[in-house]
Image (spheres, rainbow, N blue to C red):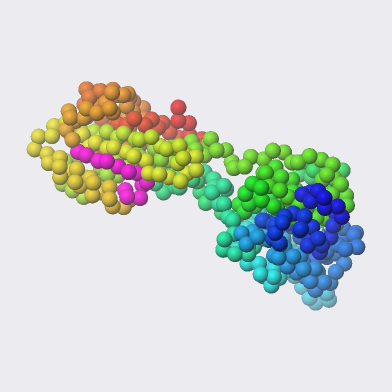
Amino acid sequence: MDFNDPFTLHTANARDISTLMPFLGDDAEPLDCTITSPPYWNLKDYDLPDQIGFGQSYDEYLAAMGEVFRELYDHTKSTGSLWMVVDTLRVNAEFPSQAARQLPLPFELSSLAAKSGWTLREVVVWKKDRTLPWSNGRRFRNLFEYVLFLVKTNDHKFKVDRLRDYEFGEWWLRWPERYNPNGRQPSNVWEIPIPVQGSWRTPTIPHVCPLPEELVKRMVLLSTDPGDVVFDPFAGTGVVLSVANALGRRSAGLDIEPAYARAFKGRSTASEIEESGNETRASAVRRMLIQLRALKYPKVMFQRLVRLSSHPAPQSILVHVGRIDAKTLRDGRSAPVRVSITFAYSDADGIDLGAITESLRAFSAQPPLSKFGVEASVEARPLESVGDQLLKRRLHVYESGRTWVTRKTVCGLDQIRRLESLVTRRNNYSYPPIVSNVKLRIVDTAASPEQSVVP
Ligand SMILES: C[S@@+](CC[C@H](N)C(=O)[O-])C[C@H]1O[C@@H](n2cnc3c(N)ncnc32)[C@H](O)[C@@H]1O
């Protein structure tokens, strides 16, 4: 074994992990993460003397795997983790009256790993699009495999924000305050097609069960940072190493079959892989959700005013949405957006605007408005006295409480006053027009944020 170039795929026995480790780092625990799919017991004959799995008794197999788990544990940092992709196994009957049975290998292996100190933290179902061709009338088609996530401590890396998605369902427009601007928490069912043989790996040395790049990418992103050491003791043709390298991690692996290491060294790294989805899209969706919340805020305030108080309704509501800070758009850690709201009364004679302002501020401090992520300054005023910056600009008008689509603009007090005819009755409320510096024109209410074009 030549470990002068340690960060590559070596032809070696997984039982010899400890020989490689000093070459991967100065401390005793150089590994940040191991991602692997172990050989199964007695399933595939790789036709090599030291292979684990084939030709062994079940006890011998477990003993060999136990040794590997112990080595991995001893050489993994306290923040580190072990991902294992493994399926259950159909075991034939030993005598005729016995039924063939499923061996719960994922859970047997995780119990075994627990004996070395590993803690099973998550179980993910990898849902595939198809299975290997076979026919057997008395079994289901097997369309999923288990992905086990094991850790050493509670401080393990788990960067869940990197995998959030924006599939919101059709209610996001009406309930933007219920959606995290960061996107949806990833689930424990991962739908990823199995790779087409020979797509990126050397076509002459195909592996019988290579992992899909997307599957490995998720594990790498969740539990490592750039520069971290990713390891695979049963590396096959090196998909784990290849994906880890493409994401700026350092990687090393072992496989007992020499052809795989030769093939791996003979080709360059896998295609460039984008670190985290599409950042531009993510920040566009964040902006939209924040704006939707900001525009819904005065609408909810208005509903509470008419429902909970005897104060008269305003003729229009003016809403100035402040700048959404760049950091919020970039990482979704939302600083509240500042919004100034004016409930405008055309004829304020005999109306106690001070009392209305007080009520509006009280609504602001209570749920649901206190949970909108909006920092609002609110006031009830005569329309005539609204003479601030807002009126110099062209403003967008939202009618009938539809705070996601504007079809009209106005400029100046006179035009706003003329909007009074737009007070519309809808869902038991006579909604005054909402006038704002923000322009949202989402016409298809069933569309996802990504499909919605805001010109
Ligand atoms: C399920 S496959 C891994 C496939 C790999 N994840 C990929 O994407 O290509 C298991 C691998 O373990 C290897 N193997 C079997 N016994 C081994 C041993 N004692 N040491 C190292 N590798 C071994 C086999 O050669 C095989 O490539």
Say whether residue 134 is visible.
no
Residue 43, given in percent of the width and then of the height, sits at 82, 62
Say whether residue 453 is visible.
yes
> Foreground residue, 176 or 266?
266
Residue 240, given in percent of the width and then of the height, sits at 73, 50
**Where on the picture, by quarter, is residue 374?**
top left
Q: Please tell me whether residue 391 is drawn above or below residue 11 in the rendered image.
A: above
Name the outermost residue toward the front: 26
Quarter the N terminus occupies: bottom right
Q: Please tell me whether residue 117 is drawn above or below residue 34 in the rendered image.
A: below
Which contiguous range is marked in magenta? 369-380
Q: Is residue 194 left or right of residue 309?
A: right
**Where on the picture, by quarter, is residue 303?**
top left
The residue that appears at 59% across and 41% down in the rendered structure is: 277
The residue that appears at 67% across and 56% down in the rendered structure is: 33
Q: Please tell me whether residue 264 is drawn above or below residue 99 in the rendered image.
A: above
The residue that appears at 72% across and 55% down in the rendered structure is: 25
Residue 405 covered by magenta stretch:
no
**Where on the picture, by quarter, is residue 91?**
bottom right
Q: Is residue 180 left or right of residue 251?
A: left
> Foreground residue, 283 or 436?
283
Residue 444, given in percent of the width and then of the height, sits at 45, 35
Q: Is residue 212 left or right of residue 397?
A: right
> Foreground residue, 200 or 11?
11
> Foreground residue, 358 or 44?
358
Q: Which quadrant contains ligand 1? A: bottom right
The total number of labels drawn is 0
Quarter the C terminus occupies: top left
